[in-house]
Image (spheres, grey):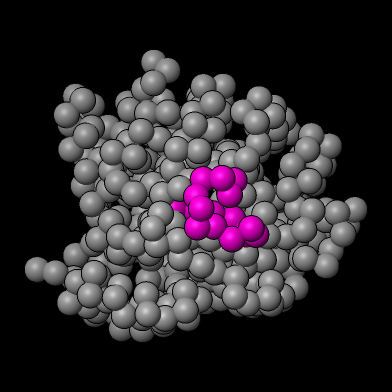
Amino acid sequence: MESPLSLFSYQNLKKILFKLDPETAHSVAGLGLRSIAHCPTLLRFVKNQNFVTHPMLQQEIFGRTFQNPVGLGAGFDKNGQYITAMPTIGFGFTEIGTVTPKPQDGNAKPRLFRLLEDNSIQNAMGFNNKGSHYMLQRLKKLYFFDYPMGINIGKNKLTSEDDALNDYETLFKAFKDYGDYIVINISSPNTPGLRDLQNESFNNAIFAMAKEITTQPVLLKIAPDMEPEDAITLCKTAVEAGAAGIIATNTTIDYSLTTHAKDFGGISGALLTEKSYQLFKAIGQELYGKTLLISVGGIDSAEEAYRRIKAGASLVQVYSMLVYRGPALIKEINEGLIKLLQKDGYNHISEAIGADYK
């Protein structure tokens, strides 16, 4: 039986959504998710249709049980409005944000584009969100909601690089008792100067500060456009400074990947797949077994997710490919992972994580 979330099948719904401006389509999809979240009976029914839980996929990470390893990447749920609906799509965890201390509108529109020929997305959103106070109020209402969740944090656009630590301090203090992990985002290409913070000095300072404020695991999310040796150095520095994990990667500004791109904003989706994988594998070769690794970027199948897992990923995240493939993709990935694990003779996902190096 097809899930009501598919609304006659996602391919039909996609024809309607793709007639809308991408940002409007995002809002419409969000409205649908919020509607489902307000109907407990429908919420349970749709979750039962889509959510995959299996002993082979369950993991204990950061003191929490992740029922499956496929999560929602940051950027979709900027204000924590769809958290309770995420299990209905099949995600084993979610990551909200990026949230900044103060509300901000983000960059001028249009700022979100479909690269249809490439099954990709290009965005120049610029951390548009309602700010940390609004997010905090949303999280306080979820006291009894038991579901793994990360909080992705970033500085406000008008905050100078010299004052960036102050913004992150504000955010660590705001969310120190919420979520299951916090992600430092200094890798978005859409906030001027943000990627300049991807350096050893800032890394040391921000993780030292985080340890003084919160006991939450704090992870670093990196850009895909770094040279592998620079990325490895940055990640090693972060881990030595106290990072509980690395998320690789954010969107790319390599516009040579397609002739259809704008000359601003970050590209995600199918165009990012290989670039993200190659950098992730370079990091995995150095850091697998030394810290938690999460892979994100153009994951569109169980086979691709499995490739990241064998390269060292304990968890993977999906966002842009959801736009092209629909909610059924998450169930397909999780069910496909079980079959791939069985095919290779593994009893549990932990045996496959980092298999390329064993």
The location of residue 152, given as percent across then percent down, is 61, 57
The location of residue 122, given as percent across then percent down, is 53, 60
Q: Is residue 73 magenta?
A: no
| 331 horizontally vs 292: left or right | left
Up/down of 114 relative to 355, above or below: below
Q: Which residues are magenta?
A: 254-269
Tell which of 296 and 85 is nearer to you. Answer: 296
Up/down of 140 relative to 241, above or below: below
Up/down of 79 relative to 279, above or below: below
Quadrant location, the C terminus: top left
Residue 149 visible, this orientation: no
Q: Residue at x 54, y 69 (%)?
A: 112
Residue most extreme to the front: 259
Q: Quadrant of residue 247?
A: top right
Tell which of 238 and 248 is nearer to you. Answer: 248
Q: Is residue 257 magenta?
A: yes
Residue 164 visible, this orientation: yes
Count the marks: 0
Q: Residue at x 56, y 21 (%)?
A: 286
Tell which of 265 and 27 is nearer to you. Answer: 265
Residue most extreme to the left: 1
Quadrant location, the N terminus: bottom left
| 70 horizontally vs 157: left or right | left
Q: Quadrant of residue 283?
A: top right
Q: Residue at x 63, y 77 (%)?
A: 109
Residue most extreme to the right: 162
The location of residue 103, given as percent across then percent down, is 71, 76
Q: Residue at x 16, y 29 (%)?
A: 343
Residue most extreme to the top: 358
The location of residue 83, given as percent across then percent down, is 45, 69
Tell which of 64 and 106 is nearer to you. Answer: 106
